Image: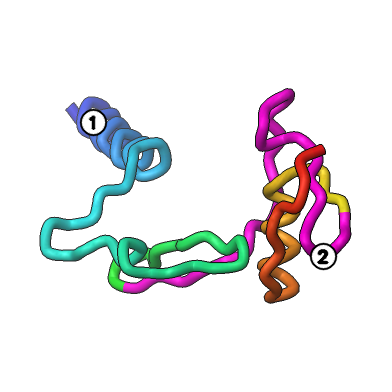
Amino acid sequence: MRNIETVAILFSTTLVWLQLTLGCYQFPADIKDPCETKDCRRGSKCRPSLDGRTAECVCPEKCATYGDSRGSRPVCGSDGRDYSNVCELERTACKEMKEISIKYQG
């Protein structure tokens, strides 16, 4: 009987871990999503705290590549610099705390 209890505990723990790591996070009913009212500028993205009560704007650490899509094409920024994609432009704007817009695609 002891082995069955151990297996049941391990299985339950694994399910909880999978829900936490693979499932979508849902805010508790009594807590409103703090990112709904957060205005993140200069390429930053809203990130809620672990308890879901506060949020902060953070700069992207890296940019994903999506192959040949509109978001992965080079752009020219309003700062006169070329960027490999829109994400890199937004990342630079965020890190340098400057407003940089897309002047030209390609």
Q: Residue at x 74, y 55 (%)?
A: 89
How busy is the neighbourhood of tag 1: few (under 14 within 10 Å), some, or many (20 plus)? few
Residue at far left of view: 30
Q: Give x and y (percent) for residue 68.
A: 73, 24
Residue for badge 1: 8
The magenta segment: 54-81
Task: Tell me if I can see residue 51 in this picture.
Answer: no
Sequence-first tag of 2 and 1: 1
Q: Give x and y (percent) for residue 40.
A: 49, 67
Element at label 2? loop
Q: Residue at x 42, y 42 (%)?
A: 21
Name the quadrant of the C terminus: top right
Q: Amino acid at mark 1?
A: Ala
- Please identify the dominant SS of the magenta region: loop
Residue for badge 2: 79
Name which quarter of the figure residue 101 lies in.
bottom right
